[in-house]
Amino acid sequence: DAKTTQPNSMESNEEEPVHLPCNHSTISGTDYIHWYRQLPSQGPEYVIHGLTSNVNNRMASLAIAEDRKSSTLILHRATLRDAAVYYCILRDGLGGGGNKLTFGTGTQLKVEL
Amino acid sequence: DGGITQSPKYLFRKEGQNVTLSCEQNLNHDAMYWYRQDPGQGLRLIYYSQIVNDFQKGDIAEGYSVSREKKESFPLTVTSAQKNPTAFYLCASSIGVGQGAREQYFGPGTRLTVT
């Protein structure tokens, strides 16, 4: 499985934008970039995904580098409820391996008042 | 409301006992998954099922068993052969297995403690 590299932790102030980076230099042409987040003692929650183009949804934006070797999850205005572990995951778009998700240790986002 | 239900939220067992964790979904999803999470770690895949009456081992299947007799249900049994069963267990489902994005939806998890 292609691997991702994320910082262990990041901090942000409430109401400010947050940029969470992810490196995936071994990404293949068919890998989707997925982001999930996990609040304490809860199951992960899907945030966003993309393949080549930047993506926006109600939760966040995903900026994908032109060479696809890195991506950035953007929370436009962080709130205390955004404090969570954020996982960047590559998933085989051809459906190999049962479409499984391979989780790393993610980035712990801390949001302060 | 559509979603995934896992019960119970907390489960305590004595060493040497088998225990079955429940996972039910009403999302009409074909694929279901079981993951395990240890403190400070990411999730690891135990088993997955693409359709009824079919399932495959994930990365850490030893000491676990599953069944998929109904589309809505995918119970996980933690057997006495599992050496370190204490963990947070998460069930997930997705619309199917195949090409495309296929995001997964997770249940609230069951925290199993074996002493």
Image: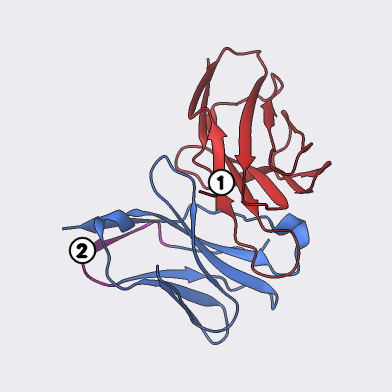
Q: Check disc 1 and report the residue beneath it.
A: B43
Q: Position of residue B100 (x, y in %)?
A: 69, 70
Supply the letter of whichever chain is red. Answer: B
Q: Quadrant of residue A67?
A: bottom right
- A8 drawn magenta: yes
Between A24 and B102, the one lying in front of the other is B102
Q: Nearer the viewer, mark 1 or mark 2?
A: 2
Q: Check disc 2 and report the residue beneath it.
A: A14
| B75 relative to A49 in the view: left or right | right
Rendered hue of chain A is: blue
Between A41 and A108, the one lying in front of the other is A41
| Stretch of the chain drawn in magenta | A7-17
Q: Residue at x 48, y 30 (%)?
A: B9
Q: Chain of mark 1?
A: B
Seen as rendered, the residue at the extreme bottom is A66
- B8 drawn magenta: no
Q: Measure the C-alpha gap from mark 1 to mark 2.
A: 28 Å
Residue B16 in view here: yes
Coloring scheme used: by chain
Q: Which mark is residue B29?
A: none
The relative height of residue A53 versus residue B4 in the rendered view (above or below) is below
Q: Position of residue B52 (x, y in %)?
A: 80, 44
| B14 relative to B47 in the view: left or right | left
Between B110 and B52, the one lying in front of the other is B52
Q: Chain of mark 2?
A: A
Disc 2 is placed on an element classified as loop
The three-letter amino acid code for the residue at tag 1 is Leu
Q: Residue at x 55, y 35 (%)?
A: B6
| A16 relative to B106 in the view: left or right | left
Q: Total marks drawn? A: 2
Q: Residue at x 62, y 31 (%)?
A: B22
The three-letter amino acid code for the residue at tag 2 is Glu
